[in-house]
Image: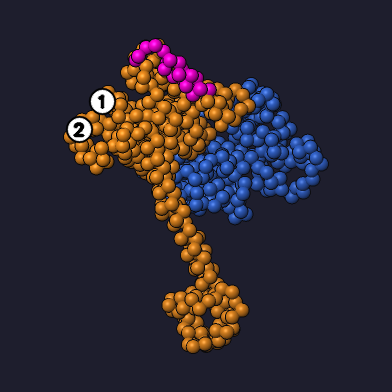
Chain colours: A orange, B blue
Amino acid sequence: MEITEYFNLLFTDYTLQTITLGTAVLGALCGMLGSFAVLRKQSLLGDAISHAALPGIALAFLITGSKDSNTLLIGALISGLIGTFWIRGIVKKTHLKSDTALGLILSLFFGFGMLLLTFIQKMPNANQAGLDKYLFGQAATLVSSDVWTMCIIAGLSLLILLVFWKEFKLLLFDADYTKSLGFNVKFLDILITFFIVISIVVGLQTVGVVLMSAMLLAPAAAARQWTNSLSVMVLLAAIFGAFSGVLGTAISASSNNLSTGPVIVLIAAVFVLFSFIFSPKRGLLFREIRYQSNRKDLELHKTLAFMYHIVKTHDNIDHPHAIKILNNFHGFTRKSLQKLESKEYITVNKTMWSLTEKGFDKAANLYNQQEENE
Amino acid sequence: METKYAITVDDLTVAYNYKPVLWDIDLAIPEGVLMAIVGPNGAGKSTLIKSILGIIKPIAGSVKIFGKPYKKQYKEVAYVPQKGSVDWDFPTTALDVVMMGTYGSLGWIKRPGQKEKKAALEALEKVGMLSFKSRQISQLSGGQQQRIFLARALVQNASIYLMDEPFQGVDATTEKAIINILKELRKAGKTLIVVHHDLQTVPEYFDWVTFLNVKKIATGPVKDIFNDGNLTKTYGINYKVSVQE
C-alpha cells in the first residue's frame, strides 16, 4: 500500500481511522506529559518505566492466559509502578545516584521480562504468539477499545494538567519554594509521575517498550526550541507528538507492516533535528547568522570609531582624510568603506574619505547605543 | 515586657546519611530583627533555613513560627532560595516568576487574577525590574535574577523573610539596592534572616547575628557578640575583623 493510498483510505476505512486516531491521541498525550518529564530533568525515568513494564505484560499473560491488551496493560502498569517506586527507594535509602538506580531497575526488569517472554514462547500452548509486539510496537493491532482507553487517559491527563496547572508549573520551576508555600509537593509529584507512567503504559502496544521514552522526550525537546512559554511548549509538544504518531503509523502500515515504534521515533527525531537547526531563537542556524552579522557590525563600528578619533582633532567634521592613514588599521577593508558609505556615515572621494554629520553622531553615541541595546 | 519571638528552634538535629549537619540547635529569633547567619561552608546555614521552612525533615527537635508549627504559619513566611537552586532556562518570564509569590495565599487550584498581577508589578517596581517584566528569565543577569527572587518573596507580603545568600554573585549596586529593601522591611516591623558570607559588612547591614558551625556558637545583637572570639570559634582560625563603630 502506498502512503497516498493510506491517506485516501483514511476517509473510508474504519480500521485505519481507528489506528490513526489512536496514534494521534497517543502522540499528543506523550508530548504533553513528556514536556513535564523533560523540564523536571526526569528524561531517563520514562525509559526505565517503559522497560520495567515488560515483565508485567508477560506475567499478566501467564496468570490470565488472555491476550486482551487492556488486561496486559494493567500488568504493565503495576510492574511499571513497582519499578518507579523502587527507583525512588534506591535513591532515597542508599548513596546511589539516580542514573545508577534508573540503569539498574531498567536492566533488571527488562532482563526479567525477556526471560519470561522466551519462557512463554517455549510453552506448548499455541496461543502465545504476538506478545513480542510489545517490544517494538505494532500499531496495526490497535482496536477501538484500545483507542477508547487512550482517549479516556488523554482526557483525564488534560483535565489534571488544567486543574493543577499553577501547582505543576511552580513544582517544575522550584520544588523547595513550592513546599515553603504550603503545597503538598509529594502529592503533586506522585500525581504527575503516575500520569507519566500511565501514558507510557498505554503507548506500549503502539511504540513498544524499547523506544517508548523517545515518544515522551522528542516532541518536548523539539517544542522547547520554539517557545519561551510553558503553555505553548506543552501545546506544541502535543501537536508534534500527534503528527509523529500519525505519520509514523502511516509509513509503517503502508510498507509491509514495519514495526511502528522505530518509524514513529524516527519521524519525531526529524522534528527534533529540524527544530534544533531552524528555530528562530534557539536554533543553530539563526544563532550562527546572528553571530556573523554581529561580528560584521562590530568591525564596522570599530572602523567608524577609529575615524571618529581622527576627525575629533579637526575643527570641521567633513575635513577630508587620506584612506592611506587607515592602512595599518586592521578593522578596515574596501568593502567596509563601501558599506559605511552606503549607510551615509562617510563620503569617499578617490583616495580621501570624510565623515558625515550623521556618521559623526553615530560614532559619538556608539557606546551609549550599545548599552541601550543590552 | 517579654520579648516576642518570631521563630523558636528547639534541639534541632538534622543529618544526611548519618553525618550530622546540624547538631542540637536552640535558637530564639526576636521579632523585628535583621539577622545574619554566618559560618564556614558546610556549617549547615542553608539546612537551618530549609529546616525552619519544613523543606527538610529533622531527625529531632522542633521549629515554631510565632509559637505554632510551620504548616499552620506558611503564609507568614517568605523564602528566597539560593539563585543556583533552580534552572533559569525554564520557559517563563520575569513577571511570571514574581507571580509565583502569590500562589501560596491563593491556595490550591485558584488562578492568579488582576489583583495578583498588580501586586507582582508593584514588587517588580520596588526591586527596579519593572522594565524587564516580559523578559525570558534565562536572559537576565545574575543580579537581576536575584532581584526577581526578592520580588517574588516581597509579593508574599509575609512577616518573616528567610533568605539564602541573596548577595551571592551580585554587583555593588544590586547589593546596596537589596540591603536598602531589607532595611525598609525591618522598619516595617518584619523579621529578616539572611545567610551571609561577607563578614566585613555584617556590622553595617545587620543588627542581629547567629554564628553557626554544625552547632550554634552564639546568637545575639551584633554590637554585643560580633567579635574575634566568636569568629575564631566559628571559623576555627584566628579571625580578625575590624569592626567599625
Q: Quarter of the image holding residue B4?
A: top right
Position of residue A287 measured from the top left corner of the image (x, y, whole percent): 47, 56
What residue sits 47% from the left and 60% below the top? A290
State the residue position of label 1. A144
Left or right of B151 on screen, residue A150: left
Position of residue A142 measured from the top left corner of the image (x, y, whole percent): 30, 27
Q: Please say whether residue A221 is visible from this viewpoint.
A: yes
What residue sits 72% from the left and 42% below the top? B223
- Tag 1 secondary structure: helix
Classified by dominant secondary structure, the portion drawn in magenta counts as helix
Q: Is residue A215 a member of the stretch shown in magenta?
A: no
- Identify the mark at residue A13; answer none if there is no mark: 2
**Residue found at the very far left of the displayed protein:** A12
What residue sits 47% from the left and 81% below the top? A346
Looking at the image, residue B41 lies above or below residue A104 = below
- Identify the mark at residue B105; answer none if there is no mark: none
Badge 2: few (under 14), some or many (20 or more) residues near its Cα, within 10 Å? few
Q: Which residues are magenta?
A: A108-127
- Tag 2 secondary structure: loop
Left or right of B41 on screen, residue A197: left
- Label 1 lies in what chain? A
Amino acid type at circle 1 is Ser
Position of residue A268 measured from the top left corner of the image (x, y, whole percent): 39, 41
For the residues marked 2 and 1, what is the alpha-carbon distance in whole angstroms?
13 Å
Looking at the image, residue A211 lies above or below residue A293 = above
